[in-house]
Image (cartoon, rainbow, N blue to C red):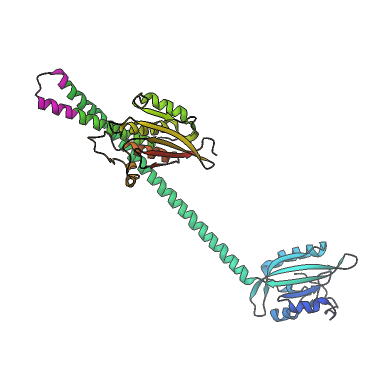
Amino acid sequence: MRSAKLSTQSFISEEDPFAGISQAIPGLIWFCDPEGICNYASPRCREYTGADFITSRGNGGFAFAHPDECEKLTASWAESLKSGRAHECELRLRRHDGVYRWHRAHAVPELNEKKSVKRWVIVCIDIDEAKKLQEESAAMRQTLLRAKEELERTVAERTKQLQQVVEQLESFAYSIAHDMRAPLRSMHQYAMMVTQDFPGQIPADAQLYLQKIASAAEKLDTLVREVLVYTRVSQGEMVLSPTDLDRVLSEVLVVLPEVNSSQVELKIHRPLHTVKGNETALIQVFSNLLSNAVKFMPPERKPKIEIWTEAKGEDSVRIYIKDNGIGVPSQDREKIFQMFERLEPSAKYEGSGIGLSIVRRAIERMSGKIGVETSDNPGTTFWIELKKGDAR
């Protein structure tokens, strides 16, 4: 630290307002002349260090600074003496028992009438406990950060492994389902060929059995096709973009003559909102829901289907598809979306039990939601919630 000739003024007058203040403030206070030579120290300075600040090389408490801070402190303190600007730093000061404790030092210049430095007032406040807590907190943050990074790496690795397993299973399911269709079609075709090529030669019971074989093969082929669709929806790439629902419905009605028929009362409240979705997936969704609306209908009732959209909040759209069919009991609202679940006997209403599973999976992959509402009136209302087409 700075070494200089001691000032001859080693006291302050009792009239000096700092005399009383320096003894009242719970900290170490000393004064230096414009050259940085200590000429006054409060009684607490001697109590803390067990030495005389004024005779300790003339630079007061800085003479008791930890060696690790000396070089940096000497340079910054010399700069303040030269510029006359206030000086602030954190340093460790040696106590009378040899223990170093952290302090925050504030050195403020007191100016005379000519605006030059009359003397320096230095106040040191003990921050050792706060400093230790700060260091412990920083160490804890580092520990937590390392634990967080390790957890994220573990989760990423496990997620990657799980994704690979899922992809392998989906590929396997797709391969099996695809390979199963060929023998099923052969079973159906051979059964029909026997019936057609040997008319009158087949006993009635045998003909009935052949029809059952053909029907079972056809049902199983339909089931396999539904599994393939579910696999494609689950596994295929799902690019989302603004999608015109009016255009989607128009395409669906072209391939669903049973819905776009004079036997069905179809009401669409156009224009429908634009949503952020995948057009191919939405065509599959509407195809399944509209086919079900016609399929699950009492034979004596004319199908009525109503479609409309509503804005939900600032960035979502809810699509409603309402029918007057057999309805869904309230306790089965979730059950109907499970794979292979059928609420009605297959003999009464044909179906694979996969259609609504495909619908829900497609909606989930578009980051949407789906639900069903029922009421005392006949029928069911399905709703789908997706982001608006222009939502950011």
Q: Which residue occupies the foreground of this view, 209 or 260?
A: 260
Decide if residue 98 is in sight here: yes
Q: Residue at x 71, y 64 (%)?
A: 72
Q: Quadrant of residue 280 in the image?
A: top left
Location of the C terminus by quadrant is top right
Q: Whole-percent x and y of residue 200?
A: 10, 18
Residue 310 as seen in the image, left or right of residue 342: right
Q: Is residue 25 magenta?
A: no
Q: Is residue 159 above or below residue 391?
A: below
Q: Quadrant of residue 11 in the image?
A: bottom right
Residue 277 as seen in the image, left or right of residue 213: right
Decide if residue 53 is in sight here: no
Q: Which residue occupies the foreground of this view, 96 or 390?
A: 390
Report the predominant secondary structure element of the magenta stretch.
helix
Q: Where does the magenta region start and end? A: 194-213
Q: Whole-percent x and y of residue 155?
A: 43, 51
Residue 2 as seen in the image, left or right of residue 252: right
Q: Is residue 196 magenta?
A: yes
Q: Whole-percent x and y of residue 273?
A: 50, 33
Location of the N terminus by quadrant is bottom right
Q: Whole-percent x and y of residue 77?
A: 76, 65
Q: Is residue 373 above or below residue 5?
A: above
Q: Which residue occupies the foreground of this view, 300 or 264?
A: 300
Q: Which residue occupies the foreground of this view, 355 or 176?
A: 355
